[in-house]
Image: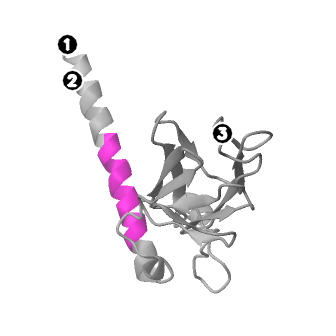
Amino acid sequence: MMAASFFSKFDYHGSMSDSSPLFKTSHFIRNLDSKDTIEIIKTMVAGRKRADIILTDPKSSVNHCEFIPGNQELLVKDLGSTNGTQVNGASIGTEPYPLKPSDIISIGDAKFIYVPVKPFSAGVTKEELSSDLGRKKLMVFIIVGVLGLLAMFVAGLIWFQGK
């Protein structure tokens, strides 16, 4: 039953879609001053009032910029702010700008660093998952992991009974 629910993520051609959680990158921005970290899970507006990411800097606009997550990349788009949005010190204009890992986003005097987290793939590529061999490889990986956990549990029970 577990295999059926896992493989239900495959479309009718037998391939994994790009929107699958297995291949989706998690996007984080971290404030370099406060060290606060924000996960960008949906399009989020950064600004001074009524925004998803509230900024207290007077140099930031009410609706300054937005972060737009995709499966593999994060875009930042200036919303016509007074002082603009910069990436690594360069103004990005009002078109969506793709961020790279460790890019520094400046919104007024506030600075954020982009930190993407790639998914764990268990050594199985997207192309391999589309094949029977790749599916078998992943299932073996899962079974070995579960057996390893079971062995540690049994060893713990034996150790506790000996005390």
Where residue 55 is drawn, which disc sits there?
Answer: 3
Q: Calculate the distance from the C-alpha at mark 2 to the C-alpha at mark 1.
A: 7 Å
Q: Amino acid at mark 2?
A: Trp
Amino acid beneath label 3: Leu
**Residue range of the region highlighted in magenta in the rendering:** 137-150
Viewer-proximal residue among 149 and 109? 109
Q: Residues within 10 Å of mark 1 (few under 14, many from 20)?
A: few
Contact between marks 2 and 1 (CB within 8 A): the answer is: yes
Q: Which residue is mark 1?
A: 163
Q: Secondary structure at mark 3?
A: loop
Amino acid at circle 1: Lys
Q: Please name whichever residue, 154 or 71, is drawn nearer the observer in this view of the structure.
A: 71
Quarter of the C terminus within the rendering: top left
Q: Is residue 144 left or right of residue 120?
A: left
Picture layout, residue 160 above or below residue 25: above
Sequence-first disc among 3 and 2: 3
Earlier residue among tags 3 and 1: 3
| Residue 38 lies in quadrant | top right
Q: Secondary structure at mark 1?
A: loop
Q: Mark 3, mark 1: which one is toward the viewer? A: 3
Q: Are marks 3 and 1 in contact (CB under 8 Å)?
A: no
Q: Residue at x 32, y 34 (%)?
A: 153
Tell me if residue 35 is in the magenta stretch: no
Counting from the top left corner in percent of width and height, residue 134 is at 42, 77
Predominant secondary structure, magenta span? helix
Q: Position of residue 143 (x, y in %)?
A: 38, 57
Q: List the residue tagged with mark 2.
A: 159
Q: Quadrant of the N terminus?
A: bottom right
